Image (spheres, rainbow, N blue to C red):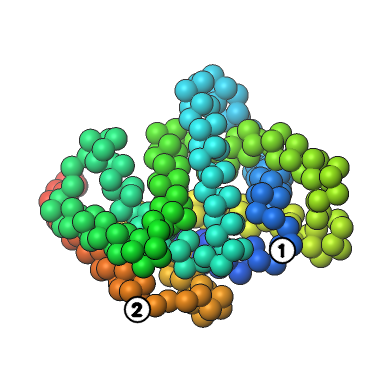
Amino acid sequence: MPESRRGVLYGIAAYSMWGLFPLYWPLLKPSGALEILAHRVAWSLVAVIAILAVRRHWSWFRELLRTPKRLGLLVLAAAVITVNWGVYIYAVNSGHVVESALGYFINPLVSVLFGVVLLKERLRPWQWGAVGLGSVAVVLLAVDYGRPPWIALVLAVSFGTYGLIKKIARVGAAESMAIETLVLLLPALGYLVYLQQQGAGTFGSLGTGHALLLAGGGVITAVPLICFTASALRVPLTTIGLLQYIAPVLQFLVGVFVAHEVMPPSRWAGFAIVWLALSLFTWDSLRAARKTRRTVPEPVTA
């Protein structure tokens, strides 16, 4: 199988798993969102250490310790992804799957704004149009919900911030995840011990199956990340940009057709504007990529 096709399949697998996450977290009830988050952190560390052990890849750790700035960025990334994971688990288990999908739909537009404001990047006119449409959609959905769609906004901003930090830190996916979960391990374990002492912990008290599901949160966190990394190494960034919409589309479908969340006409209108903005953004990105390829001179061969 050609490497490019293999990369696309890895990407589809990663984003499909992320898109189906809303089916997994409700299985962990009656565990609360914070307890699930703590278990996710702890078991994710176990999973990623197992991956690194199989690869026998440890030399990066010593090198990272020599660069305090990158280490500090990963500590900051750990704090940001904790917010993202916690809000997402809360959203799914409290009946806000559709709103969480909205967060990942508008995430590319948030990343673009970060690029403009923080990295001084320049947007093309069509990109500004996409950002403007996204802003209109958020206002319309705020009117529909009767409040700002805070779950969507927190998810979009936190994941956009996380991506920005990871871009600056430039550390591999598994290596970065190992440091991030290691930073969070003590607070996570402390909270779990506290719950068990108070008799409020659910690990082990609801049977082996429930305990395995809690531990499985680490596996389902690590496996999509591995697939994503394998995809990113094999396919162009524009392909990754298109594949990323698989996750929120699946989340949206789960929210509407599995969780049966209410979707009044005004909410459909808001999502339609978001989809229009993303279509415009994607079209302009593909057009620019094709234009760049045409202007790059062919290498001269003897």
Badge 1 amino acid: Lys
Residue under label 1: 29
Could you tell me which residue is drawn at 55 percent across and 60 percent down? 91
Q: Which residue appears at 72% of the width and 63% of the height? A: 29
Residue under label 2: 265
Q: Residues within 10 Å of mark 1 (few under 14, many from 20)?
A: few
Q: How many marks?
A: 2
Q: CA distance from mark 2 to mark 1?
A: 31 Å
Q: Position of residue 254 (x, y in %)?
A: 52, 74
Against 265, residue 122 (above or below) is above
Nearest the camera: 104 or 61? 104
Q: Are marks 2 and 1 in contact (CB under 8 Å)?
A: no
Q: Position of residue 136 (x, y in %)?
A: 25, 60
Nearest the eye: 57 or 42: 42
Helix, strand or loop at label 2? It is helix
Q: Earlier in the sequence, mark 2 or mark 1?
A: 1
Residue 230 shows in the view: no
